[in-house]
Amino acid sequence: MDLSLYIHIPFCKSKCFYCSFASYPGQEDMIDAYLDMLEQEAASYDRPPCSTVYIGGGTPTYLSAMQLERVLGIVRDYFSRDEGSEFTVEANPATFDRAKAKLLLHSGVNRVSLGVQSLHDDTLRWLGRPHTAAEALESYQLLRDAGFKNINLDFIYALPHETQDQVKADLEAIEALGSEHISLYALSIEEGTDLSHRQIQPLEPDRQADDYRMVVLFLKACGYAQYEVSNFARAGYLCEHNMHYWRGGDYIGLGASAHSHILGHRFWNAAAVSEYVSLMKTKGLARAGEERLTPQQRLCETFLIGLRMCEGVWLEGLEQKFGVMLEERQKALVRQFIEEGLLEEYAGVVRTTLQGMLVLDEMCAQLC
Ligand code: SF4
């Protein structure tokens, strides 16, 4: 079975104003107990082979070098992976230094995803990021100096106060850095976040659509291929871990809030650190829920998530794989979206058009 491994480190220096992830500042005293339980959870697997590994958060680099080394040791001791297979760790410029860069590289990590978000200090402050633009650039240089040859930079665009000229200037500065991979996410204002409490309104949809088109065209012109709604890479640098997930592959998730999916069995852990630790201690697993997906559900989910990728989805192949067909109602909707120019079909492969990517969530809501 082709498996990917995800490990969630839910600790952060502070809470960014837009963040709705399972991430918690001020819980440093829980870190060692959390890592004990993470190791216990890893030990419950029988050293399965994993084609990709991704340590995300939260902020993995918020851990001390010794704690980070322990997490890397969990990957080494409890999972098997081919040398050179993709191994990504997320890093935050506020909690990164030369020693951590070297530790990651010497532990087999070959891809780092750096959360830059903006190259302007006023925007970083507005987002509640705990670092400056200079610190982000310094972290990027530390990664290059250490020898990393596969770096992703995360950015946020479509901020309500940003003009198109500012977005364009940002894109030029981002491109000049020369990273192998860029993830660009439109700011979304999620319930429960600081931005939503302050009733900050998102950029109006038309402007957001204009910015998105500009981002896609600009990065394409600079040699980055778009391969997913928000992801762009130079040739040979697609994120294999995410592709595995978008292609409907199986994965193991360790840690608070982490989801796993193995052959149609989906299960997920408690999101709060204290609950995760307590459940692991008392029950030996921290499961908050589980479900067994029917072949019809698996077909539908794999089809919908596949529409995120520019390579599209070979629908007939998926129907053969799961032994069921997409419902007539769904097929009629697919035909309607093709007529509307939101999807396109060639040789049985259905793909989302640039126009469709702007309304993909709405399309998926209708299709499911
Ligand atoms: S660093 Fe990332 S996970 Fe942590 S609060 Fe900010 S956005 Fe959320």
Image (cartoon, helix red, strand yellow):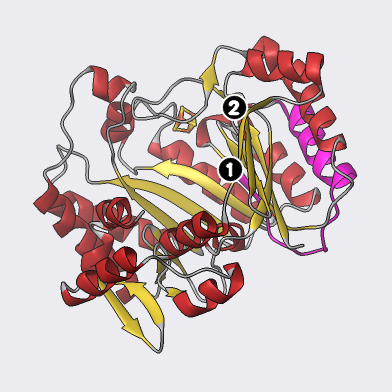
Give amino acid for label 2. Pro
Quadrant hosting residue 321: bottom right
Q: In the rendered image of this protein, does residue 355 appear above or below residue 145?
A: below
Q: Label 2, on which residue?
A: 10
Residue 329 in view here: yes
Front position in the image: 36 or 140: 36
Residue in view at x 78 percent, y 40 percent: 72
x%, y% of residue 346? 35, 87
In the image, is the residue at mark 2 within 8 Å of ligand 1 by its beta carbon?
A: no
Q: Which residues are magenta?
A: 64-90
Give amino acid for label 1. Glu
Which of the labelled discs sits on residue 166, or is there none? none
Q: Is residue 120 magenta?
A: no
Circle 1: element type:
strand
* Comes first in the chain, label 1 or label 2: 2
x%, y% of residue 14? 47, 20
Front position in the image: 366 or 206: 366
**345 horizontally vs 234: left or right:** left
Q: Label 1, on which residue?
A: 90
Residue in view at x 40 percent, y 29 percent: 19
Residue 179 in view here: no
Circle 2: element type:
loop
**74 horizontally vs 180: left or right:** right
Q: Do callouts 1 and 2 mark residues in contact (Cβ within 8 Å)? A: no
x%, y% of residue 87? 70, 54
Q: In the rendered image of this protein, does residue 118 appear above or below residue 315?
A: above
C-alpha distance separating marks 1 and 2: 12 Å
In the image, is the residue at mark 1 within 8 Å of ligand 1 by its beta carbon?
A: yes
